[in-house]
Image (cartoon, grey):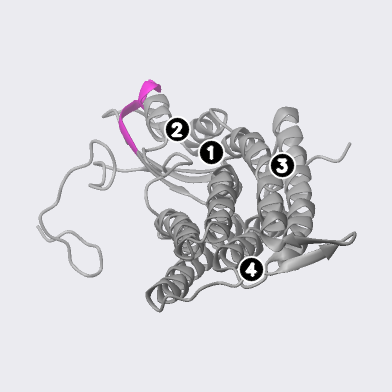
Amino acid sequence: MTVRRFGRTELTPELQQALRRATRLEWITLGMLAVTVTLVIVVMGNSQAMKAAWIEDMLSFIPPLAFLVAVRIIKRPPTRSRPYGNHRAAGVGHLVASVALLVMGAYLIIDSGSGLVSAEHPPIGTFHLFGHTVWQGWFMIAVMVLSIPGPVILGRMKIRIAEQLHDKVLYADADMNKADWKTGVATAVGVAGVGLGLWWFDAAAAIFVGASILKDGITNVGTAITDLADARARTITGEDPHPLVAKAEDYARSVHWVQAAGARIRDEGHVFHTEMFVVPHEGSAQSPARLRELAEGIVDLDWKLEDVVVALVEELPAEVHGGVERDKQSEGGRVDR
């Protein structure tokens, strides 16, 4: 069986299965979206709400595609030109998808809002079906209702896998899938409102969909930029420091020759780049073998701690837990005493 990797990280059988399942779910998502987009454009007419739903479905192609492309790129091992590997591909994909959501969410709110202000009455026509004249709105509502269960089910299935793989692109995709039922319900209500003579329901539903897309965009842009800017590693939701930071530091402090330890850990995509600064006990003999043993022990704590560097220092830098605060630093990073 082919061993699946993230860069030079050899995944456990459980994680290999999770990666295969995530890939399969994303292909299923793309197929489902293709069907939904086709059906929506067939029945869309001049409804603003249906237009918003169609644009959201089109945007929904971006996260699964970004995941599938990123996973292929990330598997490439580090080289001299890319010494940290290619894990940032996940972060780049996350940022691209987030910016697309942000821009289109803002566009939909402005476009639908202008229609509401100008009191545009959306015409919803009729179909001739088997000798009967049928209101087109029924087809719109049916398509929206039928489009709700798939994304919700897929989103819930993806969430757990995203947490296993620490994949924020997959997590953002799952989070948007879970919220897609709001789009379906809002669009169906908007179309039904037009049928009842409430013309403004259509634009109001489109604004609601646009606001939902904009919210997803703002949240994910913030998380993506924070990760790409080398912030301290955080959980997949971006709300709390990742527990591996404290776990790695506690392990280093538990080593008998280490007096103090603090880590700089940044999120590279799926894995973390770790710099562990250690202050040895006075008089303890140091050797490259001891440093290598400590680094290997940290790597063994969790598969995400892929790239670990141990540095001996006289005192911990201010940027890590237990570090010494310095009042002033020159541009070159040297301390002015």
Q: CA distance from mark 3 to mark 4?
A: 40 Å
Q: Earlier in the sequence, mark 4 or mark 2?
A: 4
Query: As displayed, is residue 149 above or below residue 187?
Result: above
Query: As displayed, is residue 14 above or below residue 140?
Result: above
Q: Amino acid at mark 4?
A: Ile
Instruction: Kindly indicate the quadrant of the structure image that contains residue 118.
Output: bottom left
Q: Earlier in the sequence, mark 4 or mark 1?
A: 4
Q: Which residue is mark 3?
A: 22
Q: Which residue is mark 1?
A: 305
The secondary structure type at the circle numbered 3 is: helix
Q: Residue 80's x, y, as percent?
A: 63, 64
Magenta extent: 253-262
Q: Nearer the viewer, mark 2 or mark 1?
A: 2
Q: Residue 264's x, y, as percent?
A: 37, 45
On the rendered image, what quadrant is the C terminus found in? bottom left
4 or 154: nearer the eye? 154
Q: Earlier in the sequence, mark 1 or mark 3?
A: 3
Q: From this viewpoint, is residue 14 visible?
A: yes
Q: Nearer the viewer, mark 4 or mark 2?
A: 4
Q: Amino acid at mark 3?
A: Ala
Q: Nearer the viewer, mark 4 or mark 1?
A: 4
On the rendered image, what quadrant is the N terminus found in? top right
Q: Which residue is mark 4?
A: 124
Q: Residue 325's x, y, as percent?
A: 15, 47
Label 1 Cα neighbours within 10 Å, binned few <14 / some 14-19 / many ≥20: many
